[in-house]
Every structure is written in structure tokens, then in C-alpha cells.
Image: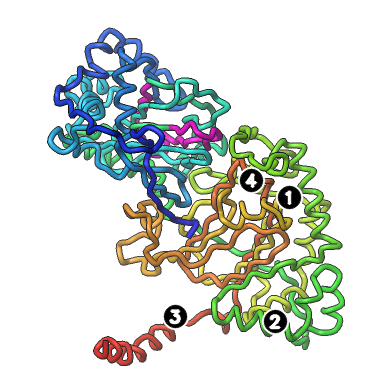
Amino acid sequence: APAMAASEKKVGSSEKNGAPPSKRAKVVTEEPAPIVPAASLEARVGALRKAFESHSPYPLVVIDAVAPDPELLDEARRELVSNLKAAFKETDLFKVYQVPEDLGALTAATDATLRHLRRLRDDLYDPKFRDLVSKITNAGPLSDRIDCSANVYAQGGHLLCHDDVIGTRAVSYVLYLTDETWTAEDGGCFEIFDTLTTEGEPPEPSPVPCARVLPAWNSLLLFGVAPGRSFHAVQEVYARGKPRLTISGWYHRAEQQQDESALQVKQNPSTLDQQKAGEPATVAPGFFPPFEDGAVEELTAADIAELRAWVSDEYLTPEAQLLVRQKFADESSALLERFVRDDGLAAAIRASGRHADDADGLGFDHTDDDDDDDVMATAPRDAAGVSGAWRVVGPPHKRRYLVLNNGESHPLGALKTRTQTPAFRKLLAALTGVRTTTSARSQIRRFRPGLDYVVAYPRDEPARLDATFCFLSRGYEKDAEEDLFETGDVGGFETYLCGSSSPGDGKSARDDVYEVDDNGEEDGDHLLTVHAAHNTLSLVLRDPGTLRFVKFLSARAPGSRWDLELVAELHPDDVPDDDLGEEDDEEEEPEEEAAEEAD
């Protein structure tokens, strides 16, 4: 599934032109000289500590030329590229190639071809170097635990906002092994977020970064891990053929400091704890006007005439509604294409979206060149599209997109008004077989290329009916662009995941998303993925505890994703009966056991 995928490829090849070497390479057993020796930094400790402490919004420092001899560091990079494979992994939070080998487990006996890489790892965790890190960051005693990995961000790779707080992590580091010619236009910067505080609430990151650090070759970035403070992200990589290669990891607190660490997390919950805790989600009474006294809930001729002004005719016949209703009954979801009349609101929404994307410089043009893989997307402005009517919604460790306020004059605002009628409420029931109350919530959203997303986090609410109208500025026509959205390559799709329905079972649904298994394979939690497509209505009956997310929309997307998200409260008589499902399972057990015995 696009929500969680994995594959393997070599980080690079040690064989010229892909041909095997004619002779077996000679194995060199002599250990190389130190690559990042502690002695080379001793004279710089005072200045580095001052820079670390004075950095805002949280302590951070970048050590340039950390390896006095760049050739030795380059040898480590070549060994990594030539001898290790990287597994592609993608979740709601990231898109990256991860080297599955435990760098802490490399030994001379088993990894003779990785001499410089092992030397580099040993240098980073050498007691003298570790003490220097402690002095620079004022972290106190650090344990001898080795915790590091190699990561490769290819074009489109990214890591969304988080604070790194897990367990006893005290100091995070990133050693950049990137191309020496890396520039800001290549993307992949380390993004730093300031925090916003509200009385009685945990600190949250500001919606947009306040600074970015270039991933410069032979530089080491250090920052203190602090719950609710050390928010950061990896900007999308725009360059092709220039992977953002890093060795990153953590220095952990010594045992005597673990109690203090736990107290900090209790006072300021970490990103992961905030995501696990979820947030309340309510619906507003009176979204739909009540039916008139004595009125039936079936569609009338007057209702059909009202809906025909904006809904495609194919969804207004009893026969079509029956087919959709049967599919919805079987799958608890249905995707209705060309739902809004193309000659009316749908065309107006598309034209408005194109105009906005052009004005904001958003959207990657895939039509000018048949071979555009070498053409880079450009970094979007953080404030692109923000105006009096459109505002940024955060916090970015959960979501970031634009929402429209007071949008009656916008075509999507007109669509929202059309949905707030008894006629559309009846149509929803005719298409799904599920009735709703007058309570619902809705918002008009814009997901901008290179900027926006929603991550999976629990929402405290009962079963709901999700009705999401999706529109695209570009890329929906029957051409090559459509494949970008259909395959999920540029993101923008919405995925539903099975969450924990038992609050007391000690397991958070967020764990399943945050901690991907080593093979990146589905573990049964994926329920549904709805790809972004122009002029579609997605109907989903969402159970309590179900997680949903909208994947980060790449800067290489042809244009923005525009949608109207409507979440409706179910009629009490139409709420799914979980107990009935359990009884059905119990009744089927004898047949399942008999089948197993027969096998």
C-alpha cells in the first residue's frame, strides 16, 4: 500500500559500469587513522558550546569541517555506498531509504570492506569524543550506548515535524555525507521550528519553520533532545541523482539522569506522546437543517430537481443509488467519480485552483519535456497561498494545510452551502444506506505541493460518515500526469488505518504507524487508500479508533489538492454494532476449525 511500502536497492555500486571485477579485490586489514578525532575539536569546545547555548529557539550547533582529513571521510562514504543496501520505507511521517544493518554491530571480522565506516562509527562514540559532545551540549554524563544508522533521502524524500524524544535520548546528531556541491535549491535542509505556548496546554511547534540548515558535506549537527521543544524536520529533497546521505543517531543519558529525563517528558509531552493521546473531535449541531414535520427521508421530485443543479445526473437515479449502496454495504466505502457537474461547480473549482497555483508559483509542469526527471522542482514559499481568507492550520507534528474561512464567494464555499441541505442529507442516505443526524463538521482545505499533509493520530470520536469532495488544479486529465496521483508517487492520497479499539490494552494505534517493521510490509492495519483525483466524492464509514492521514504532497505534484471534508454524525439506529460482529465471528469458528482439520 502507498501508506507503508518497502523495497531494496544498493546505495551505490562498487563495480564499474555494473560489470563484475576481473580480480578479487585485496582485503586490507590495517585500521585507518581516526576520521573525526576528539583532539581536533578540543580547541573549539568553548566557541562551540557558546554557539550551542545561544542558538534559538533551542540549543543547536553545526560543526563545520568535523573531519580534518576529508579524504578519510570520503572513504567511509564510498564504503557505505558500495557495500550496503538501503530499504525504501514510506509512512505518513517519512519517505526514505534506510540501511537496515545495525552500524553498532559492525566488526572487523565480519565487515572487512567497511574499515573506514567502522572507524567513523568508533570515533563518534569514542569516550573522548562523547565527553566533548557532553561539554558542548551541557548534557551531563552520557552512556556508552551506540545508537546510529545510515539514511538516504532521494528525490522526494522527506521527514515531517517531530522532536526526537524517545527513551533516554539526550543529544541528536546528523553527520552529512552529501555531495560537496549541495545547495539550498537541492532541498533536504534541516528545518527548525519555534514553539507556541497556550496556558494549560503542552508546547506545540509553529506551523512553519523559523530556520533551515543546509546539509553541507563534512558537517556535524548537534542539538539537545527536549520534549515539546526540539521540533525539526527534513525538507523534501528536490535534486535528482544527488542523494542526501547521512549518518545520524543519538547519545543517551547515563542511568543517573534517566529519572530527570522522565520528569521532563511528563512536564512537556513528546511528539509521540501527543500523537498517541489524540485529540477530541466534535460535530456541530444544526449543520444540516432538520426535516420538516411529517417529511419522509426519501428523496422527492423536488429534492432531485434541487440536486440536479450541481450533482451529475448519473447519481440521481434509483438504479445508480442502489448500486452504490450495495458496494458501500460490502466495503464500507465508495468512490464516486465526476460527482459534481463538470459544466458547473467542478469547472469553476478547477479554474479557481489553477489561477491560485499559478499566482503562488505552485505545481510542477510535467508537460514541457517528455523526460523531465532531471528537472528539479523549486522550493515553495512557506506563506504561499496564505491570505485574509486562507490561513495555515497546524500544529505541524499533526497537520499542515490551508483552510478557507468566510469563503462564500469561493466555488468551494458554494459547494459547501449546497451540501448543507436536507436534499443532500437524503442523497447521502440513498447512496450509503446510512442515515445521519443534523450534526456534522466540515472544512475547505488546500494541500499545497511541497508543504502540506495530515499525519495519522487518534481522534476521540465515535463512528462517523466521512464524505470528502476532492478536486485537482492540474494532473487529472487522461495523460501521464494522472499516473503521478494514481501511483501515489507525489503523495496527496488519503489512507485509513486500523487503530486500537481497546483503550486498556496498553497498545497505541500510533505505535503501528510510527514504528514500521524492518521489512516495511503491511501487518494488516491498512484498510483503505483513496488517491487524489479530480471531482470525486469519497464516502467512508469510519469506525471508532480508525486512523486516517493525507500523505505529504510533493513539490513535484502538478498542482494543489483542494477538498471539502464533511464528517457527519450517524443516526443512533445506524451506528455499527460491534457486538454483532463478534457474535458472527464466534458462530463461524466451528467451520474455520473444521476447515483447518481438513487441510
Residue 594 appears left or right of 55: left
Local SS, label 1: loop
Of labels 1 and 2, the one closer to you: 1
Local SS, label 4: loop
Looking at the image, which residue sits at the far front? 22
Q: Main secondary structure of the magenta part?
A: loop
Q: Position of residue 312 (x, y in %)?
A: 80, 71
- For image coordinates 70% across by 51% down, the residue present is 475
The residue pinned by badge 4 equals 557
Please rate how many residues cluster around mark 2, counting C-alpha atoms within 10 Å: few if below 14, some from 14 to 19, many from 20.
many
Which amino acid, by three-letter code, is at mark 1? Ser
Local SS, label 3: helix
Which amino acid, by three-letter code, is at mark 4? Ala
Judge whether 129 appears above or below 583 on screen: above
Q: CA distance from mark 4 to mark 1?
A: 10 Å
The residue pinned by badge 1 equals 473
Of labels 3 and 2, the one closer to you: 2
Q: CA distance from mark 4 to mark 3?
A: 40 Å
The residue pinned by badge 3 equals 578
Looking at the image, which residue sits at the far top? 43
Q: CA distance from mark 1 to mark 2?
A: 30 Å
Q: Are marks 4 and 2 in contact (CB under 8 Å)?
A: no
The answer to which of marks 3 and 2 sits earlier in the sequence is 2
Residue range (magenta): 219-244
Q: Position of residue 498 (x, y in %)?
A: 44, 66
Of labels 4 and 2, the one closer to you: 4
Q: CA distance from mark 1 to mark 3?
A: 40 Å
Which amino acid, by three-letter code, is at mark 2? Ala
The residue pinned by badge 2 equals 430
Is 396 colored magenta in this rendering? no
Please rate how many residues cluster around mark 3, counting C-alpha atoms within 10 Å: few if below 14, some from 14 to 19, many from 20.
few
